[in-house]
Structure formats: C-alpha cells, structure tokens
Image (cartoon, rainbow, N blue to C red):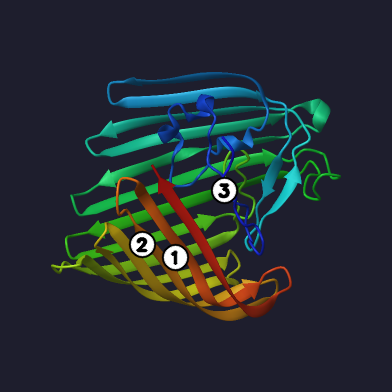
C-alpha cells in the first residue's frame, strides 16, 4: 500500500509516515510509548527478521531482531530543525518492550539497539529506559518516560558531517498529566531532550530542547444543533538547553460537536518563532472541520491555517495558507 502524500516544503522537521508492513504491525501497540523511540520504518530493507509477541498474565511483551540491508534515510536531529543522511550501510536492529499492568495503570521497560556492520563504518545506537501510566482516578491520569542513549556514529563523513566515529550520550524525558471532568479539563506536559540524544530505531527529529505545554478548557452542553461546545486556551514555550527561544505560543480557541456528526475546531495562534538566528511574530487562524453525514459519505473534512507565515529556509517573514482535505466514501 502506497503512502499518503505529504507536503514537505517549508517544514523544519522530518515527516512521519505510518507503518504498513504486516511483520512490523504485530503487537504495534506495545511499541507505542510517550517518546516515539520505536519507528519501524527506519528498518528499510530487511533481509531476515525474527519476531515474538505474547502475554503472561498481566505482563505483555514483544521483541524483534532484523538484519537491515540499508537504504533510505537516517534522521539527524537538532533543536531547530532536522536533516537527513543516506543509510548506505548494513545493520542489525533489535527492539524489545515489556509492559506490566496494574488495574488501569502500567509500568514498562523499552530497549532498542542498532549495530552497524564494521565493514560499513561501524558504530551503534543503544536506547533504554522505563515508562509508566498512572490512573489516579477517573479524572486524573499521569504518564511519563525516561530514556538514555549511548551512540557511536559510523565513520562515514562523506554521508554526514557528524558521522565521524564520535561517541554521543544523553537523555530524553517526558511527563504528562491530564485532569478531565464533564465540564473542566486540563493538560500539561514537560519535555527535556539532551543535545546528544539519538534514537536511530525511532522517530525523534528534535533534540536539545526543553518545553512546557499547557491547555485548559471549559465545556458547555447545549441542546439543539450544537451538542457540545468547548472553549480552551493553549500556552506553549520551547527553548534550547542554553535558554535560546525556539517557539512560543498563546492560542485561544473553540471546538464543537454539531449536526451531521460534525466536529469543528477553530483557534487563533499568537506565536513567536525562531528561524535561523532570527525570531518572528506570527498570527494564524488554525481550523479543522469534519463530518460523517451518511454511510456512503462515511467521513470527510478539511484542516489547515491562514495568516502570517515564516520562510524557514530563508529566515524571513511572509503570509501564507494551507488546506488539507480528505474523504472516505463507501
């Protein structure tokens, strides 16, 4: 099955494409963690693979080992943007996760390894650490993850400047708390990614930053064409490890469920965005409109933005708009 096309122009970070190969889809939910340290699309041309998935009581596990011929691209992450390098080498990829459930909560441990063949420049990337989900009540859930990475880049400077055989090691952490009642909800998240953190078996295009995100909303439940109306406010602040601003946003908005099984979400973003060595003010209207009117027209919608824009390649301000549409017809 081919990938759905995505527009890559004026994007600072690598684009994500979902996995579709059956071998890697087995037990895919066990590879899902708060930090996306597992992204099986990094295994581009498997020669052979071994996979085991199972459960023992309240403990579930999955593990795989794959011989990857190479090809495709490797993400080179950074605080303000990511780059790509050709994966012109053979490697062995190994991924394993164990998760133990306690009621609606769980604790788990993840380990990944990528070993590059010595004949292709050598090198490795090893990532490991715990994650958890704690359900304090029906209204409060806390989850988080802490990972450590140890890497030696391949000695292939012709493919990427940073691939000179150097050793890198760092951490990545995330903690998330959600409080939700029938009328009031609140979400906050804190991210901390070290400059030298690498996850070659995952999708982590941004490192070397700290981020605080918070969102609070109040829900009304009227009768009539609109069944649910939520007003909310988002605050987001992202900076490099040395304190230099990357992104700041204050964004009020509304969301509603209405007739024809429709969903509408509108918000205004008041941003300050860094591009290169400069920062720019940006104001945008961000919209999302979806509906499911009938069995034939099962789902359709549009989303995008309009207003100020930043040309990241040339570090200059401008204006622009985006429109993405989709439809499911049965």
For the C terminus, the quadrant is: top left
Q: Is residue 66 left or right of residue 162?
A: left
Residue 6 position, x and y percent, is 59, 53
Question: Are circles 1 and 2 on residues that touch, CB within 8 Å?
Answer: yes
Residue in view at x 51 percent, y 26 percent: 22
Residue in view at x 67 percent, y 40 percent: 151
Q: Residue furthest right?
A: 158
Question: In which image quadrant can residue 108 be found?
Answer: top left
Q: Is residue 211 left or right of residue 309?
A: left
Q: How many marks?
A: 3
Other residues around mark 3 within 10 Å, as few (<14) / some (14–19) / many (≥20) = few
Q: Where does label 3 land, which residue?
A: 16
Residue 169 position, x and y percent, is 63, 45
Q: Which mark is residue 212?
A: 1
- Separation (CA) of disc 3 from disc 2: 24 Å
Q: Residue furthest front?
A: 296
Q: Where does label 2 land, which residue?
A: 188
């Amino acid at each position: 099955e081919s990938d759905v096309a995505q527009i890559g122009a004026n994007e600072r970070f690598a684009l994500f494409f979902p996995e579709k190969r059956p071998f890697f889809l087995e037990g895919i939910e066990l590879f899902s963690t708060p930090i996306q340290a597992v992204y099986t699309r990094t295994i581009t041309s498997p020669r052979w693979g071994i996979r085991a998935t199972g459960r023992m009581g309240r403990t579930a596990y999955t593990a795989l080992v794959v011989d990857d011929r190479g090809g495709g691209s490797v993400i080179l992450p950074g605080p303000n943007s990511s780059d790509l390098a050709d994966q012109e080498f053979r490697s062995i990829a190994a991924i394993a996760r164990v998760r133990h459930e306690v009621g609606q909560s769980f604790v788990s441990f993840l380990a990944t390894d990528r070993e590059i063949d010595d004949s292709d420049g050598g090198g490795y990337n090893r990532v490991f650490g715990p994650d958890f989900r704690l359900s304090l009540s029906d209204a409060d859930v806390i989850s988080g993850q802490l990972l450590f990475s140890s890497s030696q880049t391949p000695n292939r400077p012709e493919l990427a400047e940073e691939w000179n055989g150097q050793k890198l090691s760092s951490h990545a952490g995330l903690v998330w708390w959600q409080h939700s009642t029938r009328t009031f909800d609140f979400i906050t998240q804190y991210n901390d990614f070290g400059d030298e953190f690498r996850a070659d078996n995952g999708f982590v295009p941004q490192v070397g930053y700290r981020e605080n995100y918070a969102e609070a909303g109040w829900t009304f439940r009227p009768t009539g064409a609109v069944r649910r109306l939520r007003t909310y406010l988002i605050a987001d602040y992202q900076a490099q490890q040395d304190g230099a601003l990357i992104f700041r946003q204050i964004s009020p908005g509304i969301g509603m469920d209405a007739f024809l099984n429709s969903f509408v979400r509108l918000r205004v973003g008041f941003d300050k965005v860094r591009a290169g060595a400069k920062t720019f003010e940006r104001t945008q209207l961000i919209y999302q409109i979806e509906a499911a009117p009938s069995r034939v027209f099962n789902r359709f919608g549009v989303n995008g933005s309009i207003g100020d824009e930043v040309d990241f390649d040339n570090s200059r301000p401008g204006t622009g708009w985006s429109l993405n549409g989709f439809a499911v017809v049965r």
